[in-house]
Amino acid sequence: MLGISFDTAEENRAFAEKHGYTFPLLCDTTRAVGLAYLACDDATESYARRFTYVIGPDGTIEQAIDTQDPGGQAAAMAAKL
């Protein structure tokens, strides 16, 4: 499991420490991943839409879920795996 945001490494580190995240938070400061995964419409957006993706061993997206409960949804998805 990993997360990704438009924040810098320093901002992600502080966020992870504050919320006790034990998984990696990747930085997408250019919005390239956000654009590719339709989490934003253009590279000027400040925030990404929240989605949970399940990516299969072959690299294909098996599920894409509009995340309503960021704290609980990731744990629920991990439990299903």
Image (cartoon, rainbow, N blue to C red):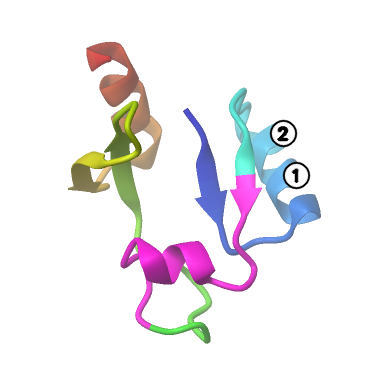
* Residue occupying the far right of the picture: 10
Disc 2 element: helix
Give x and y (percent) for residue 67.
27, 47
Which disc is residue 17 wearing? 2
Give x and y (percent) for residue 77.
27, 24
Give x and y (percent) for residue 58.
32, 32
On screen, residue 23 above or below 48: above
On screen, residue 74 above or below 45: above
Q: State which region is magenta.
A: 26-41
Mark 2: amino acid: Glu
Q: Residue at position x 32%, y 35% from top?
A: 55
Give x and y (percent) for residue 56.
29, 30
- In this picture, residue 12 sits left or right of residue 60: right
Q: Residue at position x 65%, y 61% from top?
A: 7
Mark 1: amino acid: Ala
Q: Residue at position x 58%, y 64% from top?
A: 6
Residue that carries the numbered disc 1 in the rendered image: 14
Disc 1 element: helix
